[in-house]
Image: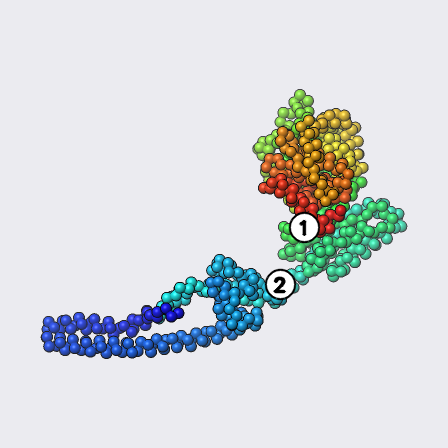
Amino acid sequence: MSNQKIKFKGALRNFLFAPFSLIIILIALNICFYFIDRQAGIGISLFIGMYTIIITIDYVRNKPRLVTELVNFAMQYGTVQRKLINQFEIAYALVDYNGKLLWVNEQFENMTGKDKNYHKSITSIFPSISKELLQSEDKMELTLQLDDKYLRASMSRIYFDSMLNQTDLVEIESDQNYLTAVYFFDETQLNHYIQENEDQKMVVAQVYIDNYEEALESIEDVKRSLLIALIDRKVNAYFSNVDALVRKTEKDRYFVVFRQKYLQQLKEDKFSVLEDVKTVKVGNAMAVTLSMGIGNTGATYSQNNEYSRMAMDLALGRGGDQVVLREGEKVTYFGGKSKQVEKNTRVKARVKAHALRGMIESKNRVIIMGHQISDMDSFGAAIGIYCAARTLDKKVQIVLNTVTSSLRPIKELFTEENGYPSDMFITPELAIELCDSNTVVMVVDTNRPQNTECPEILKMTKNIVVFDHHRQSNDIIENPALSYIEPYASSSCEMVAEVLQYFTENIKLAECEADSIYAGILIDTNNFMAKTGVRTFEAAAYLKRCGADVTRVRKLLRNDMCDYKARAEVVRRAEVYRDHFAISICPSENIESPTIVGAQASNELLNINGIKASFVLTEFKGKIYVSSRSIDEINVQLIMERLGGGGHLNIAGAQIENHSILQVKQMIINTLDEMIKEGDIKI
């Protein structure tokens, strides 16, 4: 600092220069005396001259001494401050513009093992504190880790201008801009207490046996108590490893409470009790499966219990044999790899049919809608509900926006010439105008609000009914008045066909109506080859009795030449990944319904020997549609859920925006690699 100049300023400068100010006053008086008495004026002039010489000599001689005294005082004051900072219990460091350590206190030395002679960059000790970070903001806080300590670093700049402006005594001219003071607060113990508090929080879980009645019916009476005892033992033994409290509340239900610190252990174990329970065999032909709903991060224990109940509803709505963990709005899934067990009883269908009838009877209008780009299952289910509401003499209309080439032949059967009203099918815009509080909104073949033909009307009435066979996800239609979601069902048309049998005794279906519902079952089961159970054939038999004709349906479902060629092109373009996964891209040029063709081609690829799962990508209306299929070994529903979609174990799909078709293809490949590595897919 050899080029620095020290000047007096402020009050000190005024005090030192006060005698010189007096000279000006004396000179003014002296001039006045010259007009009064010349001799007196000369005397005063001599006095002023002597006074000026004396105070000038005094100022010149005493200024260095005054400066020395000021500097000594400042040094002593600074020494006291520096000693206090050096012995400060909080680690403290001073770094320059580039992050170089200029000075550290004793606590910093003890914490880092670096002494005051260590003048390297602070980044060498704390890599997170980079030069760019120091130069980015005036003040900031950062969480760091040093060995086994957790630190909170608080950084603030000290500008030279602001420091020097605080004093009215001296002024320093310097080229340096600022230094940065860094305080380190040891929060190791605080974090330990916070973590200990989090670990001690209680997590609530509910465990259900999915197929309790079915499993018991498959064994002899004398072995039933043994089967139940073995299941109880498996469940209690599994949760005893995490110090959990397990209470059996009903014959097929358990209530479990455990500390949050064990939750991560269960996650890493992927809730192996799901697979362990399946090994229980005492002559039962059907493997026992469990569903588990877990609630966590709630503000109270009762809220965690509510989260666990909601998670259980979601697990059962997705077909069971899985764990759903709900942490606030975040939902995580585990398991769900096995095929859903078909329920032989129709009690639920009868109850839902009576509830649906009661709702429709109490309202004046019924509006039915399926998912966007309606397919045969969605359309057939809508026709079935139309027939049910018609028998009650209610005004019923179907929201249909886009009619695909595959759907057009059947849709054209419902015309005025065939006895149907001209406003049977309406646009989403008209549906918004017609919907009010006295309207029942019936949603079929989807349970996601954004996938419906007209999501807006779901907010215009509380009378919402959902009939669907897809697994539920996080985004579902909230608070429906009636919900009938059965993932084990082959199609929505199968569910509607069952409901129609219990809806009313005098219900009659026209041939085209029966054909529509039958076609929906036929398409979703791939000609009764996928997800087909006893109740599927019973529903088909009911429709056959109502007049459905296989030959007519087959003619209605025929493809045109362009669609057939496109499907063949998909098979030709298919790439086989890891010897078991077929991935292809469906051309969309000159095809009216490329998504339908993609789904059909995905089924075709499964006919190739060695293919366990197929994925067909189609670009349509700014989105990438993915159709995935499998036979039995691969759960494509889990794969599609990672891409934001969903579906069933063997039939699933996804819609992806803001990505190219090649990017989505790579996403599928990356997801397959990740799931194979994690063990969710075994090949």
| Residue 562 in view, yes or no | yes
For the residues marked 1 and 2, what is the alpha-carbon distance in whole angstroms?
24 Å
| 274 to the left or right of 199 | right
Examine the rendered structure and indicate whether residue 152 appears above or below residue 561.
below
Which amino acid type corresponds to the residue marked 2 in the rendered image?
Ile
Above or below, comparing residue 344 to residue 324 in the picture: above
Q: Where residue 210 sits: x, y (%)? A: 77, 47
636 displayed left or right of 181: right
| Percent position of residue 543, x then y | 77, 30
Q: Name above or below for residue 90 compared with residue 317.
A: below
Q: Which residue is mark 2?
A: 194
- Colour setting: rainbow
Give whichever of 374, 216 is nearer the camera. Answer: 374
For the point 45% across and 76% down, the residue is 80
Element type at mark 2: helix
Residue 53 place in picture, x, y as percent: 22, 77
- Callout 1: SS: strand
Near-viewer residue (342 or 34): 34
Q: Which residue is mark 1?
A: 332
- In percent of width and height, residue 249 lies at 76, 53
Is residue 440 shown above or below 328? above
Residue at 81% in and 46% down: 213
| Residue 382 visible to the viewer | no
| Image quarter in which the N terminus is found | bottom left
